[in-house]
Amino acid sequence: VRRHLKFINMKLSDFSHFIREMPVQYQSFEVKRDQWQFGLRKDIIASIFETHDTISISRSDIFKTENDMERLIIMTLMWGYVYPSRGRGNNIKNLLNVEWGNLCSILPKYQKKEISIETMKKDIQGINGLGLSTMTKFTYFLGTKICGFESLILDRVIINTIKRSR
């Protein structure tokens, strides 16, 4: 126990050099085909898996889809929701089915553009099942700048850390 206590007083800034050097482009997750056999986007999902039952999707793979918005959306959702539950409630099913048209019309406006917090907030509120965590994944992979800053992925862990001032 005593040797682990020394890490409590460390700050994220203590690791800034290490973080800058991390090869995050290669961070990947394994995704199983059987967890994505639902909804109306089966043709795109099938083309992503090809003949494989399990694939690995990295950040780099998603960046390579920038010219295919539908593929980028689905691969981002797969990369961000690798757990069997596919997120909370029916959010993923809702995004792939009911809100698909809204996502496909809104997200191209974010690609390599600068937007305001107000625009992002309005768009999140306008799409049922879309939250801050998922939207920041999209903005990150689309190369969006928000109020002049490069987009970062704000997932639940990061948001909770900020709230706790850690």
Image: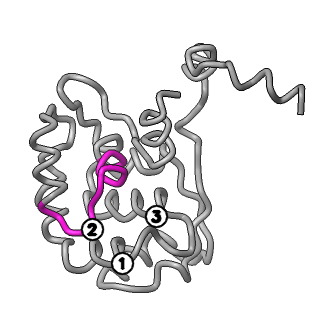
Relative depth, front residue between 8 and 98: 8
Looking at the rendered structure, the kind of residue marked 2 is Gly
Image x and y of residue 50, in percent: 51, 74
Rendered view: 98 above or below 66: below
Image x and y of residue 108, in percent: 16, 51
Q: Main secondary structure of the magenta part?
A: helix
Looking at the rendered structure, the kind of residue marked 1 is Asn
Helix, strand or loop at disc 3?
helix
Q: Tell us which disc is closer to us: 3 or 2.
A: 2
Image x and y of residue 53, in percent: 61, 77
Tell me: 77 left or right of 55: left
The image quarter containing residue 149 is: top left
Find the distance from the CA under tag 1 to the CA under tag 2. 8 Å
Rendered view: 82 above or below 50: above
Q: Which residues are the magenta region? A: 126-138
CB under 8 Å between callouts 1 and 2? yes
Looking at the rendered structure, the kind of residue marked 3 is Met
Query: Would you name the residue on which mark 3 appears?
Result: 78
Q: Residue at x 10, y 43 (%)?
A: 119
Query: Quadrant location of the N terminus?
Result: top right
CB under 8 Å between callouts 3 and 1? no
10 Å crowding of disc 1: few (<14), some (14-19), many (20+):
few
Rendered view: 35 above or below 69: below
Q: Earlier in the sequence, mark 3 or mark 1?
A: 3
Relative depth, front residue between 36 and 54: 36
